[in-house]
Every structure is written in C-alpha cells, then in structure tokens.
Image (cartoon, rainbow, N blue to C red):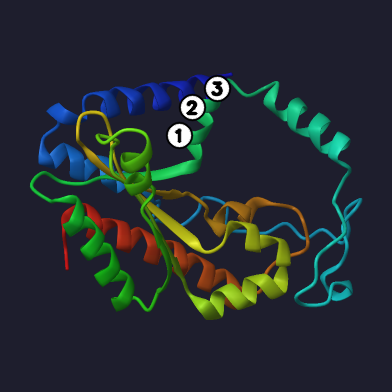
C-alpha cells in the first residue's frame, strides 16, 4: 500500500505541475524535463537464472523473423489484465501519464522551431525519419479553425529495428519510434513519446533474454529519442 500511496503522490504532483505550467519559471521547466528518463544504472543488476517456466518456449526453438503463437487466449488475457488492474489505483488518465515521457518546450521557442530542432538532432544521431503527420491541418479545415496544433514525427534506427523484429516480430506494433508535439489549452508546447526502456526487464526471471548487443542498441535508441526531445524542448539545433 505504501508503494501505491507513493505512486499516487507522484501523479498528483505531476498533475499540479502540468496545471501550473503557464506560471513555471524556465529553471522549473528544465528540472521537470529532466525527469523523463533515468540515466543511472538500474537498481537490479543480477539476472536470475531459471531453466524453464511454464508456457515458455526456449529461444533456440524460435526462428528469427517469425510470429509466435498466442501467449494466451483473449479471454485468459482479459482475466489476467483485470486481475492485475484490481490492485492498480490508477485511472485511465493516470495510466496514460505513466506510459508517456514528456517535456515542456521552454519559453520563446516556436512550434516550427521545435519541429526543426527535432529533425536536426535526429539527423545528427542517424535516426532515420519515417513519417511526419499533421492532423491539426485537417481538424482546422473540417471541424475547428482554432484546433490546437498537433504533429506526429516518427524515427527509426534501421539496424536495431531489424534485430528487434528478428527477435520478436510482434514488436512491429510499437515501431517506429514516435514523437508527438502538441499545444495544450494554455498555449504551452509539449513533446511526448511512449516511455519504454529495455532495462525494466533486468529483474524479470524469464530466461528468454535478448542478446547483450541488442540490449545496448535498444538502450541507445531510447537515449537518442531523449536527446531528440531535449533538442526540441530547448530549440537546440
């Protein structure tokens, strides 16, 4: 229960910061932005050695670039998730907040400058652009001419992508890496991305480990996305 109370306190603080973003100083914004990625070493450094787990298929039995059979039926998945959620104090907004890394764009930086900085940093890091969508244009034409600006940019490290897809073809549902740039109702510009980190698996007992090379590549991709977001938030070319 103490863990849940701590989580609730963190989320509450996050909401208060978000609501007060228009009154935050530039130093407070920078401090807020630094919370979007953990740059230290994970607390769990040793990986438990387990020979087998029920329902686990050994890596040697899985060819590269192949879909796996379903882990469980849709009904069993529903029951499993509902069981886990029964101990979860978070609502939908809290869950989305938990799953997303976000940064505030500092004062004086325009939306166009954010986009330009993001693309420039991605080029420097050899993160190939794979898409750029501007749904706000259609929304302004068809629904509301004052619809807040919202753009989606996608990037990919092609070699790491291929290695991950060979390991688990299902991961394609999460690719390419996407960064969103948006305005809130105060005019504050935000940069967000799906917050995933392969280091979360360091404490998992499952024996089906990715290779050390792929693990390091996956960490580097997450760090590159963080760097790209930093560039957008600070207007750094």
**C-beta proximity under 8 Å, tags 3 and 2:** yes
Residue 77 figure quarter = top right
Depicted 19 relative to depicted 178: above or below: above
Closer to us: 153 or 17: 153
Q: Residues within 10 Å of mark 3 (few under 14, many from 20)?
A: few
Disc 1 marks which residue? 97
Q: How many marks?
A: 3
Question: Which residue is at a point 82% across and 29% down the rendered structure image?
Answer: 79
Query: Residue 104 vs residue 178: left or right?
Result: left
Q: CA distance from mark 3 to mark 1?
A: 10 Å
Query: Residue 216 vs residue 36: left or right?
Result: right
Q: Residues within 10 Å of mark 2 (few under 14, many from 20)?
A: few
Depicted 129 relative to depicted 111: above or below: below
**C-beta proximity under 8 Å, tags 1 and 2:** yes
Q: Secondary structure at mark 2?
A: helix
Query: Residue 98 vs residue 135: left or right?
Result: right
Residue 24 figure quarter = top left
Percent across and percent down for residue 177 are 48, 61
Percent across and percent down for residue 178 are 45, 57
Q: Name the disc covering residue 91, or none.
A: 3
Percent across and percent down for residue 202 are 62, 56
Q: Secondary structure at mark 3?
A: loop
Closer to us: 161 or 146: 146
Question: Which residue is at a point 89% across and 42% down the rendered structure image?
Answer: 73
Query: Residue 51 vs residue 201: left or right?
Result: right
Q: Secondary structure at mark 1?
A: helix
Upstream in sequence: badge 3 or badge 1? 3
Q: Name the disc covering residue 93, or none.
A: 2
Q: CA distance from mark 1 to mark 2?
A: 6 Å
Q: CA distance from mark 3 to mark 2?
A: 6 Å
């Amino acid at each position: 229960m103490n863990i849940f109370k701590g989580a609730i306190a963190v989320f509450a603080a996050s909401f208060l910061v978000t609501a007060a973003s228009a009154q935050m100083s530039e130093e407070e914004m920078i401090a807020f932005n630094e919370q979007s990625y953990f740059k230290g070493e994970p607390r769990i450094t040793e990986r438990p050695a387990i020979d087998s787990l029920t329902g686990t298929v050994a890596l040697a039995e899985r060819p590269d670039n192949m879909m796996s059979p379903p882990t469980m039926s849709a009904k069993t998945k529903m029951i499993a998730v509902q069981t886990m959620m029964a101990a979860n104090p978070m609502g939908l907004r809290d869950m989305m907040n938990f799953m997303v890394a976000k940064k505030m764009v500092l004062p004086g930086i325009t939306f166009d400058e954010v986009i330009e900085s993001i693309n420039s940093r991605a080029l420097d890091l050899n993160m190939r652009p794979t898409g750029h969508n501007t749904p706000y244009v259609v929304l302004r034409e068809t629904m509301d001419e004052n619809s807040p600006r919202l753009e989606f940019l996608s990037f990919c490290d092609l070699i790491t992508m291929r290695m991950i897809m060979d390991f688990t073809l299902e991961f394609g549902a999460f690719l390419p890496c996407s960064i969103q740039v948006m305005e809130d109702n105060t005019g504050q510009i935000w940069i967000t991305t799906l917050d995933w980190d392969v280091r979360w698996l360091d404490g998992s007992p499952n024996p089906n480990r990715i290779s050390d090379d792929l693990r390091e590549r996956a960490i580097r991709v997450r760090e590159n996305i963080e760097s790209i977001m930093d560039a957008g938030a600070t207007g750094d070319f």
